[in-house]
Amino acid sequence: MQKLPIGIQSFKKIRETQCIYIDKTKEALSIVSHYSYAFLSRPRRFGKSLFLDTLSELFACNKELFTGLYIYDKWDWSQKYPVIKISWDGNLRSIEDIEQTALDMLRFNQEKLDINCENSTNSSSCFRELIQKTYKKYNQKVVILIDEYDKPILDNLDQIEISKEIREYIKGFYSIIKGSDEFIRFAFLTGVSKFSKASIFSGLNMLTDISLDEEYGNICGYTQNDIDTRFQSYLKDVDMQRFKRYYDGYNFLKDDIYNPFDTLQFIAKKFKYKNYWFETGTPTFLIKLIKQNHYFLPKLSNLVVDEKLLSSFDIENLDLEVILYQAGYLTIDKVIEDEYLGSISYKLRLPNQEVEKSFNSYIIDTLLKQSTDKLIFQKNIYMALLRGEVDSFVENLKAIFASIPYNNYANNKINTYEGFYASVVYIYLQSLGLKIIGEDVTNRGRIDLSVIIDEKVYIIEFKVIDDDQNVALEQIKEKKYYEKYQSFEAYLVGINFNKNDKNICSYSWEKL
């Protein structure tokens, strides 16, 4: 069996050590043939750096590395181009850190290309000089490859003023590319986010964004065919349906994609189902956004956004849905075309069980600070729903709300919002990997939560009230929400919260 390329982002190392390499050179050939300036957005640890390095070796004409690959007999190996590679590594927490890192990267490229820049203290000037002198020295246009172009900004979203300052700095740095067009053969940028043209990309308006082009939908990650062929010998004793549910499910308008980092770690760790990708880092500012904006978390299970939203990221107006999609916590489920309006929108979903369970458990731990009792609550809730024991289900919900620290309610009014209570219930249920529909649409209105487990469906409505009236259940019955689920064993559950007690004050339920 071939070796696994665990932790290797060098195309040359993978090929020389005969590791498994999923051939992406067909996409590479298409991009460099059709575009002079291109941009690709994908979540972290999805193979962007490896693809960028593949391009680097291609333009350097290291032909022997491409033996047996799609591009081998289709590329002009006689035409070699000098390559400038930029990657934002390290701890980038101030404008001084960014400037020093930029100068270090440029110094590395100078040494590699045998170029000496006279202006070695100003990164933008040095970058311009490096491009021009490289072109002159090699008598050939330059290729520029920038990996994780947005990392300096994303690393500082918890300190917005510094993040805005860094945005202006790297906007000026990248604008050097546009001003050097006559010296450039090809430029390719990768990142997690796509900032709006009014911000960081205003100086790079010639870039073509290929992130949602169907032709490049499989450019990063592993397809089912890759798993069934290249990894078959590694996974022969694995329950493939379970493996698929846990790590597959990302979609960028072509095939469903397995997370490559998860796949390799799963094999290396002897088939242990762990949240490998998720545990590599979750930004804490997400929790801050959820809490500050009273975000209704059940929306995440039934979310539709327009095309513009997916391609826009604004530091000064952070949108949770955009962040979650671009960071990989949501993915595309379905494209919705409105022929009458001539518009396109996207239905989003959580990609797989890893994200469903780990993201919601993370919220429980950090937003509700309930990591100690979480596993007990999760087990009790799951068993109660599986057995149709609604009273036990609700009693566990009461215990959950009773255990939320008092300071979670300090200096805010989240206890007066129905959405807060629905969100808490939602994240516990979602962390169990159950099928949940938030704001479930019927012909008579919207159900707060529909929860499906085996052949059972729980239709749940929440109300925040001042007395003990069972208004939640009455709404379910009055609007006949259950008619949508006539083939299921249906449980109608109305739960009423008291905003003063910050807990369930009454509930009622019926089984159909």
Image (tube, rainbow, N blue to C red):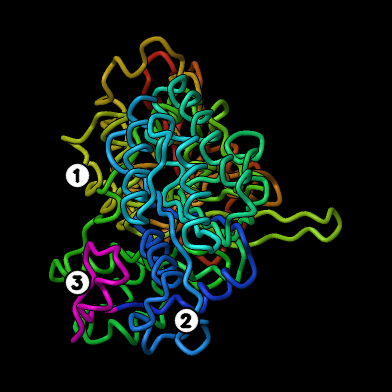
Circle 3 sits on which residue? 267
**Rendered location of residue 48, percent (x, y):** 41, 60
Residue at horizontal 46%, vertical 77%? 25
Mark 1 vs mark 3, foreground winner is: 3
From the viewer's side, name the closer residue of 74 and 511.
Answer: 74
Mark 1 vs mark 2, foreground winner is: 2
Query: Looking at the image, is 269 positioned above or below residue 348?
Result: below
Query: Looking at the image, is 351 positioned above or below residue 509?
Result: below
Q: Is residue 484 left or right of residue 473?
A: right
Q: Secondary structure at mark 1?
A: helix
Main secondary-structure element of the magenta-colored stretch: loop
From the viewer's side, name the closer residue of 297 and 483.
Answer: 297
Residue at horizontal 33%, vertical 37%? 101
Part of the protein shown in magenta = 1-20
Label 1 to label 3, Cα distance in Å? 26 Å
Per the rendering, the mark at residue 286 is none
Can residue 512 be seen?
no
Q: Is residue 395 left or right of residue 268?
A: right
Q: Specify the amino acid type for callout 3.
A: Ile
Counting other residues with Cα less than 10 Å from the Cα at mark 2, is it few (<14), some (14-19), or many (20 or more)?
some
Reading the chain from its start, which is encountered first: label 1 or label 2? 2
Residue 10 forms part of the magenta stretch: yes
User: Contact, CB < 8 Å: mark 1 with mark 2?
Assistant: no
Query: Looking at the image, is 136 positioned above or below residue 176?
Result: below
Task: Kindly indicate the quadrant of the structure image that contains residue 372.
Answer: top left
Q: Specify the amino acid type for callout 1.
A: Leu
Per the rendering, the mark at residue 375 is 1
Counting other residues with Cα less than 10 Å from the Cα at mark 3, is it few (<14), some (14-19), or many (20 or more)?
some
**Rendered location of residue 6, percent (x, y):** 21, 66
Circle 2 sits on which residue? 77
Label 3 to label 2, Cα distance in Å? 36 Å
